[in-house]
Amino acid sequence: DDIPVENYRKHWHVIFELSNGKQLVYSDIRRFGEIRNVPSFEAYPSFLQIAPEPFDHDALNYYLACFDHKRYYDKPIKQMILDHRVISGCGNIYACEALFRSGIHPARKTQALNHQERELLLLYVRVVLQEASII
């Protein structure tokens, strides 16, 4: 009820009542998302393909190793960092901002980036995601 625009409320699909008295609302205007009830993380194979969170201690090594995978060799860098098998949670708006801040053109081929540019890009993905979580 705190959201005054009716247009947003009509896309609410599930409302979770939390133990602290607040509500968590699942709203999916474009209907790309889904909610699944699975007995364990391992029971849903797609979860096992998700890359580490960008802030995890092993994220940098995992991300850098992805540049050696044949599937990404000739891809534009933006396409690679949008792949959740490479970086978890980096959506389009965050990818665009991180690429802009790092001075890397989104259409540049992954193999054209040197090691320093690759690391810089992940740094900016982290910065952009951190800034987004503060807002």
Image (tube, rainbow, N blue to C red):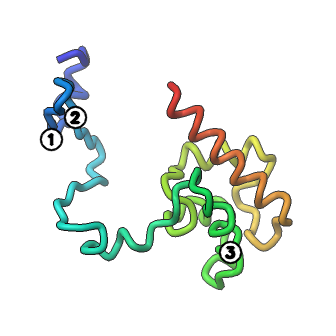
Mark toward the start of the polypeptide (3 vs 2):
2
Residue 9 % position (x, y): 19, 28
Looking at the image, residue 88 lies above or below residue 28:
below
Q: Are marks 1 and 2 in contact (CB under 8 Å)?
A: yes
For the point 15% across and 41% down, the residue is 14
Q: Gap in Å between the C-alphas at discs 3 and 2?
A: 37 Å
Neighbour tally class for label 3: few under 14, some 14-19, many 20 plus, Cα within 10 Å? few
Identify the residue under disc 3: 65
Secondary structure found at label 3: helix
For the point 15% across and 36% down, the residue is 15
> As shown in the figure, which amino acid type bears the numbered disc 2?
Val
Name the quarter where the N terminus is drawn: top left
Where, by quadrant of the figure, is residue 29 drawn? top left
Neighbour tally class for label 2: few under 14, some 14-19, many 20 plus, Cα within 10 Å? some
Q: Gap in Å between the C-alphas at discs 1 and 2?
A: 6 Å
> As shown in the figure, which amino acid type bears the numbered disc 1?
Val
Mark toward the start of the polypeptide (1 vs 2):
1
For the point 45% across and 67% down, the residue is 50
Foreground tag (1 vs 3): 3
Identify the residue under disc 1: 14
For the point 68% across and 74% down, the residue is 65
Neighbour tally class for label 1: few under 14, some 14-19, many 20 plus, Cα within 10 Å? few
Secondary structure found at label 1: strand
> As shown in the figure, which amino acid type bears the numbered disc 3?
Ala
Q: Are marks 1 and 3 in contact (CB under 8 Å)?
A: no
